[in-house]
């Protein structure tokens, strides 16, 4: 992790509800939270995660770049894309300068299908909505309940239905 990326990660931990977001120029732009003494690093947990990931490769790249490396049943790929909006007011899909549109959801589905065809174990989380359920109708779709801590209205924070799609 480069120093600049680590510094951005560190700032994100101290920002409003831990949100990471960039503006249209690619600059980090989330306001600071009201934390008195935030835990930037849980050293014991970081050591456990480090040991678990020792033989793992983590990449940050466009989602379809995974097609170059994931080729067999020994591979596991998890996608956590910007979720498809489920209402007129939940249309935020731009955590950075690149928005994620329905056509991108379709391209992601096509990547998921190709990986599954290769025998790769693939998992994806997304909104529980007809569009996503239709895209992945040929795969096991699991309804899950997730807690959301980010909403400008604290009363609207809480559990929401999501889907977990698997190729296995």
Image (tube, rainbow, N blue to C red):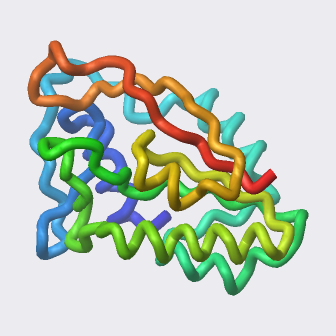
Q: Residue at x 37, y 75 (%)?
A: 103
Q: Where is residue 8 in the image (x, y as percent from the top left)?
A: 30, 55
Between 101 and 137, the one lying in front of the other is: 137
Q: Where is residue 145 in the image (x, y as percent from the top left)?
A: 49, 24
Using the rendered view, name the quadrant where residue 104 is placed: bottom left
Using the rendered view, name the quadrant where residue 148 is placed: top left
Between 131 and 160, the one lying in front of the other is: 131
Q: Residue at x 13, y 37 (%)?
A: 32
Q: Where is residue 86 in the image (x, y as percent from the top left)?
A: 29, 43
Q: In this view, does 7 lie to the left or right of 34?
A: right
Q: Residue at x 61, y 54 (%)?
A: 137
The total of numbered circles placed on residues is 0
Extreme residue in the top direction: 155
Extreme residue in the right direction: 73
Between 93 and 103, the one lying in front of the other is: 103
Q: Which residue is drawn at 44% across and 40% down?
A: 128
Q: Is residue 126 above or below residue 17?
A: below
Q: Position of residue 88 (x, y in %)?
A: 14, 46
Q: Is residue 55 above or below residue 10?
A: below
Q: In this view, does 54 lie above or below 143?
A: below
């Amino acid at each position: 992790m480069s120093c600049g990326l680590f510094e951005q990660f560190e700032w994100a931990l101290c920002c409003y509800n831990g949100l990471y977001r960039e503006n249209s120029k690619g600059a980090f732009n989330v306001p600071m939270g009201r934390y008195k003494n935030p835990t930037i690093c849980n050293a014991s947990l970081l050591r456990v995660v480090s040991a678990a990931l020792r033989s793992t490769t983590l990449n940050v790249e466009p989602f379809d770049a995974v097609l170059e490396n994931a080729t067999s049943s020994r591979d596991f790929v998890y996608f956590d894309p910007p979720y498809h909006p489920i209402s007129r007011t939940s249309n935020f899909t731009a955590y950075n300068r690149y928005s994620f549109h329905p056509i991108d959801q379709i391209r992601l589905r096509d990547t998921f299908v190709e990986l599954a065809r290769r025998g790769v174990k693939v998992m994806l989380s997304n909104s529980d909505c007809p569009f996503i359920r239709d895209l992945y109708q040929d795969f096991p779709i699991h309804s899950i309940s997730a807690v959301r801590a980010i909403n400008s209205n604290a009363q609207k924070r809480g559990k929401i239905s999501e889907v977990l799609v698997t190729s296995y």
